[in-house]
Amino acid sequence: NAGVTQTPKFQVLKTGQSMTLQCAQDMNHNSMYWYRQDPGMGLRLIYYSASEGTTDKGEVPNGYNVSRLNKREFSLRLESAAPSQTSVYFCASRISSGNTIYFGEGSWLTVV
Amino acid sequence: GIQVEQSPPDLILQEGANSTLRCNFSDSVNNLQWFHQNPWGQLINLFYIPSGTKQNGRLSATTVATERYSLLYISSSQTTDSGVYFCAAPNYGGSQGNLIFGKGTKLSVKP
């Protein structure tokens, strides 16, 4: 039982490049989330998926797109990376609203 | 949306000391969670505590929902307690059930 798995763990991108962060959970959770963490800002929600087939914007969605590929997988795409997207990205999941949330180990992204 | 504020922002303790971390939230909640982020960045659930008191070893948490605050107690602190402690509450005004995080309390426990 791996929990929430994110890849890649580290990535350096040049401005304007695109990339996709992958996330998978094996806990049969309905809801999945992408957060970013910046120094002094705590965690801020980018996008979430309340259930398979649905996605919605969070606090800071600009510059990102997401895909809920199936119940297990929720990917985050940066179409044209900008230095302001340098951050640590966390994927998370939980069975439903009101229950404990579980985080992946984080993906460190640097855009130069 | 809901506002979540934590205090203090930084805390330095000598090993063995006790501490209390506070989380204030602006709206009524039915879901309050505490997390520990270790120095390697891993986020670990500590408590899911919408109200009342829970204990887990040297850690305990109390949420007083009617007064919109939660407290995390760390007793007999150890160096492994170092890291950042976050509380999070759901943002009903926006996306229901999605957690809004405070900015965290950075704890450093010195040997």
Image (spheres, coloured by chain):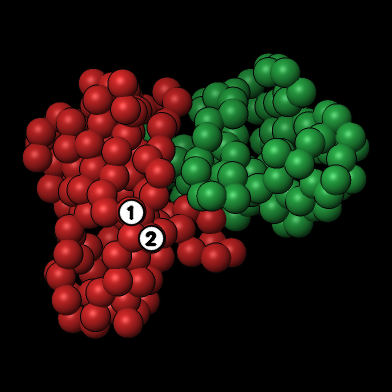
Instruction: Give the residue furthest to the front.
Output: B111
Q: Residue B65: x, y in percent?
A: 65, 28
- The tint of chain A in the picture is red
SS assignment at label 2: strand
Instruction: Note the chain letter of the green one.
Output: B
Residue at x 26% of width, y 31% of height: A25
The answer to whether residue B67 is left or right of residue A38 is: right
Q: Which residue is mark 2?
A: A108
- Identify the image quadrant of the C terminus of chain B: top right
- Look at the numbered discs 2 and 1 and tell me whether their residues touch, using CB distance below 8 Å: yes
Position above or below: A88 against A16: above
On the image, which quarter does residue A103 sit in? Answer: top left
On the image, which quarter does residue A65 sit in? Answer: bottom left
User: Local crowd at mark 1 within 10 Å, few (<14), some, or many (≥20)?
Assistant: some
Under mark 1, the amino acid is Lys
Q: Is residue B16 visible?
A: yes
Residue at x 42% of width, y 31% of height: A101
Residue at x 28% of width, y 61% of height: A61
Determine the chain carrying the residue at label 1: A
On the image, which quarter does residue B29 sit in? Answer: top right
SS assignment at label 1: loop
